[in-house]
Amino acid sequence: MKRLGELLLEKGAVTIAELHTGLDMTRRRGGRLGTHLLRLGFVEEEALLQALEVQFGVRPISERELEAVPEEIRNIVPPELRQRYGVVPVARLGNVLELAMINPLDPEVREGVEKATGMMIRPRVATETAIRRFAGDLPADVEELAGEADAGGTRRRVPPPEAWDAFWSLPPAGPEAFRLAAPARGESGPMVQVGFPDLRELIGAGLADGGDTLDLGALLARLPAVTHRDQVADLLLRYLNRYLDRVALFVVHKNRVVGWSARGEGAVMDDIQSLIIPLDRPSIFLNLRHSGTYYAGPIPPGEANHVLAEALGSPPPEEVLAVPIRIKGRPVMYAFGDSPGMRLAELPVDEIAEACSRAGLALEILILRSKITAG
């Protein structure tokens, strides 16, 4: 039986970077890969159901179809059993009960429902999201299952992270987040990753000198001399780290926000670079896109914001500062940071916004230089 992620990749329903993010969520929070991909907006229900149909070899049923099932059919299985097993009756044909299931190959669930109803079970596959809506909150042991089974239908839990990592061999950030650029004529070195499509990486260019935090004067003095996008990131993060314990930069790319770089106590670069948040889903980044200003305060509720808080590491942020960085008036990056256990009311936010504006100008100049050189 093929893994769900493999099927979704073959169908082109998700990118490698999106799958990496989903697998990382599964590793850190448990639960099903498909459920995380659906909640993050990386896959549509129809595409997920098509992959599940291939995986399990049974007909799928959508949330909309489940909504149309008459109440008397749903009640063939008592609510407590629907919740316990994670199932929803769909139709009755004589002594045969069509049953929507998260894992239609699970013999324990089928036998339990058959015993309770005295009917034969014909399984259908549905998403966990749809099952939850009509069966109620599922118990912990059901939530932790991977939703996959071996050829005999035996339950298995999510494979250990090492097994997934070895199978997929994923980089910290996927190819959808960064394009690959060949070295310029006369340069040597491997192909490198570029955060902005119009800004060529300079092979061998070092980061900014030293590693201490910077004040605004030092930042403004160094920005005019940068020749490399990562120098801008390094300088800005060092400045932000003067006021915030954990800081990160996110790039807007193809209508999504992608983690770029991070610095500070507890910040994990791989977690930041694995993060992808679509800009058509509710999030703090979408709010900033519409508001046109910065945000300082608690992370708002919502799945995407919860994922963002997890990526920042432990302890979870209580209050955050998020500042858009613009090029020609359009947000192309976001600076983000927090100081665990500390309120942000006393931060010099106007100064920080000015620093971010100057960093955006430095990036714009680098892009223009690259276009002049290429032209």
Image: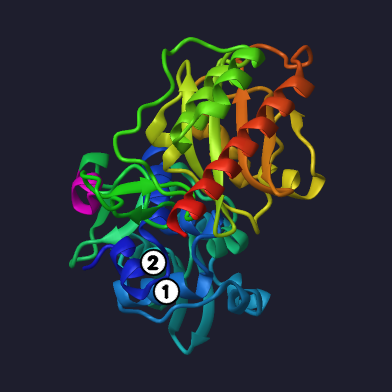
| Main secondary structure found in the magenta portion | helix
Q: Position of residue 235 (x, y in %)?
A: 52, 23
Q: Amino acid at mark 2?
A: Lys
Q: Amino acid at mark 1?
A: Gly
The image quadrant of residue 64 is bottom right
Disc 2 crowd, CA 10 A, few/some/many (<14, 14-19, 20+): few
Residue 115 marker: 2
* Residue occupying the point 29% across, 34% down: 204
The image quadrant of residue 176 is bottom left
The reply to whether dot 2 and dot 1 touch (C-beta < 8 Å) is yes
Residue 310 in view in this figure: yes
Q: Position of residue 146 (x, y in %)?
A: 34, 53
Point out the stretch of residues depicted in magenta. 163-169
Q: Position of residue 255 (x, y in %)?
A: 59, 58
SS for tag 2?
helix
Q: Nearer the viewer, residue 304 or 262?
A: 262
SS for tag 1?
loop
Give the distance between the C-alpha atoms of the residues marked 2 and 1, in whole angstroms: 5 Å
| Residue under pointer 1 | 118
